[in-house]
Image (tube, grey):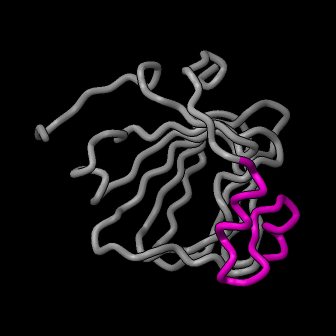
Amino acid sequence: MTDWLARNVRDLEWTENAMGAYCDLLQGDDDTAEEFAINLNVLGKGQPMAIYHHEPHQEGFLVLRGECELIVDGDSRPLRQWDYVHTARDVPHVIVGAGDEPALVLAVGGRVGGGDATYPPEALAARYGASTSDELDARAAYAQFGKSTVVPFREEFLA
């Protein structure tokens, strides 16, 4: 491991499924990824970034392009370009693409201290298939979006 890195998202692996496209900027750097997560998410209309969840880490989200819907603590709020969302640890949330053009969202989060996400049911998120029916079936909830496939970078991800 080095003490720094410089990467271009055009050179990194992207994955894609029915939830949209995703790029982990720290891929392959396990030492850094244990403490910090940073990724880009491309979301079409109605595509959730995740299943409604909370975890023992704070997270932040910056909408770089497009429109999204934030579902947080049982409430819904529209997001547009340059809106930033911060969630403290254990705050349940999900972001869903909402506009006619794909949204691009930068997500960051702490990972120090370990711990897993919890997936509580949420009626607002269920409209997008982004909720569990109980806190135990997250794997099944994610499975509905299909297996993630590694895809080459496409300019449309950032356009």
The boundaries of the magenta stretch are 122-146
| Residue 36 picture location, percent across and down | 32, 55
Is residue 104 or residue 78 the one in the foreground?
104
Give the residue at x 81% y 39%: 99
| Residue 126 picture location, percent across and down | 83, 68
Is residue 93 or residue 78 the one in the foreground?
93
Whether residue 93 is visible: yes
Based on the picture, tell me whether residue 127 belongs to the magenta stretch: yes
Is residue 20 or residue 77 the one in the foreground?
20
Where 56 falls versus 147 (above or below)?
Answer: below
Q: On the rendered structure, is 80 left or right of 99?
A: left
Considering every residue shown, the one lying at the far right of the view is 127
| Residue 60 picture location, percent across and down | 48, 57
| Residue 52 picture location, percent across and down | 67, 68
Q: On the rendered structure, is 125 left or right of 43?
A: right
Where 13 falls versus 152 (above or below)?
Answer: below
Where 27 falls versus 113 (above or below)?
Answer: above
Q: On the rendered structure, is 145 left or right of 114?
A: right
Based on the picture, tell me whether residue 77 belongs to the magenta stretch: no
Residue 101: quadrant of the picture: top right
Give the residue at x 82% y 61%: 129
Considering every residue shown, the one lying at the far top of the view is 155
Prevailing secondary structure class for the magenta stretch in the rendered image: loop
User: Which quadrant of the figure contains the N terminus?
Assistant: top left
Where 15 falls versus 98 (above or below)?
Answer: above
Give the residue at x 66% y 71%: 138
Whether residue 82 is visible: no
Give the residue at x 65% y 82%: 136
